[in-house]
Image (tube, rainbow, N blue to C red):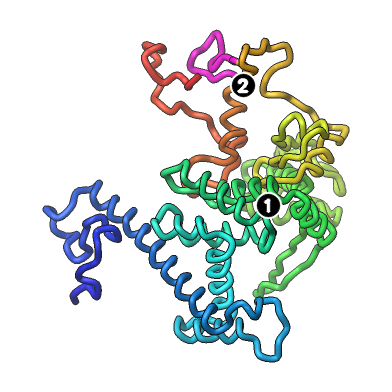
């Protein structure tokens, strides 16, 4: 069957025609990969096209006389979404979400919308950006948030992981409206709760919301107990984690199920968590830590936090503060500091300062789709290290 779009521009396909990809003379490996990249750009353009149409439908059917949160006998927003729902064969709720994003791009994030149009970001990224910037909807700083957002997007030619994109959005929103972020955090903390949900087949799900640091501590306690069994325990790690969670919540006995008389597992007494050290990496500038600045912080593996939460964590009796620049390091005339990039005795190993800097800079693994915290990931050289001639390449940048 012929393509429904026989004259589709190369912008969408990278010049690779789907009906000819089996022809060895049609495209090489790099051309095929480039065709996939172009297809993603084309999908971004089509998503922008959909949002443009949805926003225009809203302008014609509703105009400026009604907002989505208005309570009217005749809900024009819902009526507009209903037309989209029927045309796209999606539910009313999904259509309303699409319309909400369309209006956000038109009114709050027009420059972000342009980046979607040219394929610099994907529709998935737009959904994340719209959701993370809802706090500034209708605020005077909305245009500044839009401007700063695209300034960050334009710095990178590659793809954005959703974790790094969320971190970027949250930092920018906090920079322009910290009070809104603090209030949102207070509401979220006040709304923390515990609940269960049946999942069928005699099983159920146990869930709870809590502060990010408490979640990390709880996770470490569950992992420590789940890994206290011997290697012959027949359960998977996830199964042991489930059993360990029940044990810690109820004070029941957690046992190794290997069945061996000579089992060497060391299981803590019921009602007690295994001894373990939990390290939570919190990144913040010196002024915020001391209370002289009001900048956002970052919890490794969790995301951006408010300045108030940074100081709450710093005030904990078990908090350890370690500056990237060691105390006593001489300052350069321009106010900067110069630190060694490698360990003096081994040019293969990065210095502590460089190691920490890279992890702080990236936040998460740079491998696409990998959500591992940078503090739990391996650090590697940008260029392969030449062990025979250390000075010829592979050394970390200074």
Bin the neighbour count of mark 1 within 10 Å (Cα to Cα): few under 14, some 14-19, many 20 and up: many
Q: How many marks?
A: 2
Relative to 372, is 392 above or below?
Answer: above
Q: Distance between the residues labelled 1 and 2?
A: 38 Å
274 vs 282, nearest the viewer:
282
Element on which disc 1 rests = helix
Relative to 18, is 63 above or below?
Answer: below
Q: Which label is found at residue 353?
A: 2
Q: Where is residue 285 in the image (x, y as percent from the top left)?
A: 72, 32
Quadrant of the image occupied by residue 320: top right
Q: Position of residue 185 (x, y in %)?
A: 78, 54
Q: Give the range drawn in magenta.
A: 338-353
Q: Does the magenta stretch include residue 86?
A: no
Residue shown at 18%/75% (left/top)?
A: 2
Q: Position of residue 152 (x, y in %)?
A: 53, 44
199 vs 30, nearest the viewer:
30
Where does label 1 land, which residue?
A: 240
Element on which disc 2 rests = helix
Horizontal side of 290 relative to 369 (left or right) equals: right
Bin the neighbour count of mark 2 within 10 Å (Cα to Cα): few under 14, some 14-19, many 20 and up: some
């Amino acid at each position: 069957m012929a393509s429904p779009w026989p004259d589709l521009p190369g912008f969408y396909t990278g010049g690779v025609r789907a009906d000819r990809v089996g022809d060895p003379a049609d495209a090489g490996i790099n051309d095929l990969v480039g065709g996939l990249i172009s297809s993603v750009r084309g999908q971004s353009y089509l998503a922008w096209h959909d949002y443009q149409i949805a926003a225009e439908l809203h302008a014609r059917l509703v105009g400026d006389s009604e907002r989505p949160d208005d309570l009217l006998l005749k809900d024009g927003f819902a009526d507009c979404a209903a037309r989209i729902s029927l045309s796209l064969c999606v539910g009313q709720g999904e259509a309303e979400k699409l319309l909400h994003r369309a209006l956000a791009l038109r009114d709050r994030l027009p420059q972000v919308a342009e980046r979607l149009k040219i394929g610099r970001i994907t529709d998935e990224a737009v959904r994340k950006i719209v959701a993370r910037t809802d706090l500034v909807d209708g605020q005077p700083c909305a245009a500044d948030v839009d401007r700063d957002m695209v300034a960050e997007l334009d710095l990178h030619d590659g793809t954005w992981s959703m974790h790094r994109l969320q971190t970027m959005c949250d930092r920018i929103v906090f920079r322009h409206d910290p009070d809104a972020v603090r209030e949102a955090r207070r509401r979220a903390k006040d709304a923390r709760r515990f609940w269960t949900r049946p999942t069928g087949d005699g099983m159920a799900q146990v869930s709870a919301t809590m502060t990010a640091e408490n979640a990390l501590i709880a996770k470490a306690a569950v992992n420590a107990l789940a890994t206290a069994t011997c290697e012959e325990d027949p359960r998977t790690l996830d199964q042991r984690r489930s059993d360990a969670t029940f044990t810690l919540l109820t004070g029941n006995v957690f046992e190794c199920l290997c069945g061996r008389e000579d089992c060497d597992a060391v299981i803590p007494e019921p009602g007690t968590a295994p001894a373990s050290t939990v390290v939570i990496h919190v990144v913040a500038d010196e002024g915020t830590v001391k209370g002289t600045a009001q900048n956002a912080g970052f919890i490794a593996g969790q995301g951006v936090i408010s300045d108030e939460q940074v100081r709450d964590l710093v005030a904990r009796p078990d908090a350890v503060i370690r500056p990237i620049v060691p105390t006593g390091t001489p300052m350069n005339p321009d106010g900067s500091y110069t630190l060694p990039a490698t360990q003096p005795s081994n040019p293969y190993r990065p210095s502590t300062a460089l190691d920490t800097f890279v992890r702080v800079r990236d936040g998460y693994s740079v491998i696409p789709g990998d959500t591992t915290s940078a503090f739990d990931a391996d650090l590697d050289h940008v260029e392969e290290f030449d062990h025979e001639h250390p000075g010829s390449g592979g050394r970390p940048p200074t």
